[in-house]
Amino acid sequence: MKKLNGDVAWEDFDPQAYIEHNYRVLHPDDEAIITVVRDHFSGHFGGSGSVASGIDAGAGPNIYPALSMLPWCDKITLLERSPANVQYLNSQIESYGPQWDQFWDVLCRDEAYPRRVEDPRARFAQTVQPRQGNLFDLAKGDERWAMGTMFFVAESMTTSPEEFRRAVGCFMTALEPGAPFAAAFMEHSRGYRVGESDFPALDIDEQVVRATLDIHASNVQTHRLGKPGGLLREGYTGMIVATGHRSDR
Ligand SMILES: C[S@@+](CC[C@H](N)C(=O)[O-])C[C@H]1O[C@@H](n2cnc3c(N)ncnc32)[C@H](O)[C@@H]1O
């Protein structure tokens, strides 16, 4: 059944149920995604590094995209529509939960992470700012970010191909020219359940992801991950992680 982003009760998204299902332990598919994203960001900034502002669009209750940007950013915005998820993110600022250490450990397999971030909890607290807001409004203002992530959002917020393309476009427009980004997508998802509520998804594949990103980005690389950890979230066939740079214009 067709469901647009504005038709969904995002306030019913249950962060604890979502974490319990997806992020209580580190699953092999997230480990594979983190590895690709880490190498992309570390490769972009190199040893010298550069300080920038970052954004994670549609953060939900997932903090590992923010951790992946932590060594390179003065400020990281976690944009999220659901008040329940924003409340969870706020609860993690002062000292994030111990389960996130497994995710940080994967990032630390690249020496730039531990070298540039001595105390990740302290740095997270200084750097990360949750913000309740709508991805579709992002590009309306003048604010732009120097790097960005968007994980399981554009295809997991609507059944509309037009809204999927618009979500990708708004995310990309919010980035400065040349900004490195990483985005992850569920492949052929039929929607998903969190706690007691069902949420919509658009059935997409690697070709759609690439074609949509190519409009806004250069050096786009996509990686299709089968199901290294088995069927974690039901009703999909794999995950796609994409990296690249916002185009210069
Ligand atoms: C499947 S969850 C992904 C959460 C997280 N990024 C992750 O990696 O697990 C989709 C998220 O997108 C958020 N979302 C949906 N529509 C949004 C919008 N228009 N603007 C910002 N966030 C939105 C939802 O509240 C939810 O947290």
Image (cartoon, rainbow, N blue to C red):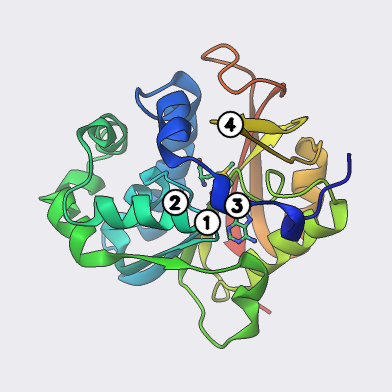
Q: Amino acid at mark 1?
A: Ser
Dot 3 or dot 1: first in sequence order is 3
Confirm or deny contact between disc 2 and disc 4 (CB under 8 A). no
Q: Nearer the viewer, mark 2 or mark 4?
A: 4
Q: Label 4, on which residue?
A: 196
- Distance from Cα at disc 3 to Cα at disc 1: 5 Å
Dot 1 or dot 4: first in sequence order is 1
Residue 147 shows in this picture = yes
Label 3 beta carbon within 8 A of ligand 1: yes
List x then y, in percent, for residue 1: 89, 39
Dot 4 or dot 3: first in sequence order is 3
Confirm or deny contact between disc 2 and disc 1 (CB under 8 A). yes
Label 2 beta carbon within 8 A of ligand 1: yes
- Distance from Cα at disc 2 to Cα at disc 3: 9 Å
Q: Quadrant of residue 203?
A: top right
Residue lying at 53% horizontally and 31% vertically, measured from the top left: 195
